[in-house]
Image (cartoon, rainbow, N blue to C red):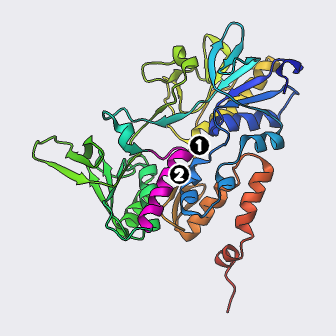
Amino acid sequence: MDLNNLKSDPIVVVGGGFGGMATLQALLAKSDGTSVILIDEGNRFLFKPLLYELLSGELQLWEVAPQYSDLASELGFIFLQERIVEIDELAQKLITSSEIEIKYSQLVISTGVVTDYSYLENLQYFACGFSNLNDFRIIKKLIATINNSSEFANPIVIAGAGPTGVELACKISDLLQDRVEIFLVEKGDRILPNCKSFNREKAIDAIGKRKIRVYLEHYIKSVDKTFLELSSNDNETNNFIKIDYSTLLWTAGLKPSKSKFVHHFSNENQKIKVNEFLQMDEYQNIFFVGDITFYEKAPFPSSAQVAMQQGSLVAQNIISLRKGNELKPFKFEDLGEMLSLGIGNASITGYGITLAGPLAFQIRRFAYLTRMPGFLLSFKSSGSWLFSKKIINRLFPQSP
């Protein structure tokens, strides 16, 4: 591909997560003929809410993590698997690690977040997150090792009882069929502190039916290769628990991905302060999307839902900017939440539904699959679900 033969400077999106892909799709839907380039270090888009179903084998890799090259062929954008090392705002160009220079007309930065291992010294050497395909492979191998072993296995410890921690605990518990105990550690006084009350109640029920022990108002004070120490929030010297563990899964925090080329934009929390239009005031043709953004007057929640809504708005604002029209401010619309609670089980609050159980699991799965980027992939994924005889019989049981 010869970038020098483009008819005009392209619109460039850096980062192919939820925000980046939402921006791309919305731009291409209202294309004025300008080329759109996606730049990402990886080769696959990862639909993270369905990573639990990939772990259990309920979904396949192509359904959860399609390749950018396939999406590019279908949707009509240009994909570069590259790492950005420098941005020249005045010259409006990017430089990659391969020394490729890419000029842009508008730039969207959506580099996302990674697991934050900074809470404890050397934590990254002893813990595994659950935010990418490498994490998935590590946990998948762990489950296979435990299930294929006749020896006693030490407990799995999961730090953080937010959605990721709770969903992961339930799914792993089902996959291990009570072979080992799971310890779920939460510094707060309840699980899922920011979730809907209905979903929290259903999660408590799901945990109670499994070999999961919850430690509320506790945190991990120290960890090494074989032992970790739990301490209660009151920090009493004699109020701690020493655990000989098999694996530590860290879901207790995320941080913006380290990108040196945007370091000078970031605040002390590594986030980028944006205006209501998701721009920096200094550079009107640069937009930011997703968990890296911070708006002082109305902080955004950190979620895929927010990133996708931001991406759609940024695409509209780029089109308006190119036409000389007024930009629209970002306003988050909470559409509800869906939780996976083990194999074949889920809880939904929102979308006009309050539901838990197997049907909620099927609705959740179908809702997510229909949001996959690209019509062909979305149709193929949701179609494979919809036309399953087992699902048809479950949703529409026939009279005897």
* Quadrant, the C terminus: bottom right
Q: Is residue 139 magenta?
A: yes
The residue tagged with tag 1: helix, strand or loop? helix
User: Viewer-proximal residue, 134 or 195?
Assistant: 134
Q: Which mark is residue 158?
A: none
Point out the stretch of residues depicted in magenta: 129-147
Amino acid carrying mark 1 in the image: Gln
Q: Quadrant of residue 67?
A: top right
Which residue is outermost to the left?
A: 238
Q: Which mark is residue 305?
A: 1
What is the x, y in percent for residue 362?
Answer: 61, 65
Residue 333 in view (yes/no): no
Using the image, determine if residue 106 lies above or below residue 238: above
User: Sequence order check: which comes first, mark 2 or mark 1?
Assistant: 2
Which residue is outermost to the bottom?
A: 400
Q: Residue at x 52, y 17 (%)?
A: 263
In the displayed structure image, the side of residue 57 where residue 217 appears, left or right: left
Q: CA distance from mark 2 to mark 1?
A: 25 Å
Residue 10 in view (yes/no): yes
* Quadrant, the N terminus: top right
Q: Quadrant of residue 117?
A: top left
Using the image, determine if residue 131 lies above or below residue 9: below
Amino acid carrying mark 2 in the image: Arg
In the displayed structure image, the side of residue 107 where residue 265 appears, left or right: left
Q: Which mark is residue 137?
A: 2
What is the x, y in percent for residue 384?
Answer: 73, 65
Q: Residue at x 72, y 45 (%)?
A: 373
What is the x, y in percent for residue 271?
Answer: 49, 24
What is the x, y in percent for residue 391?
Answer: 67, 73
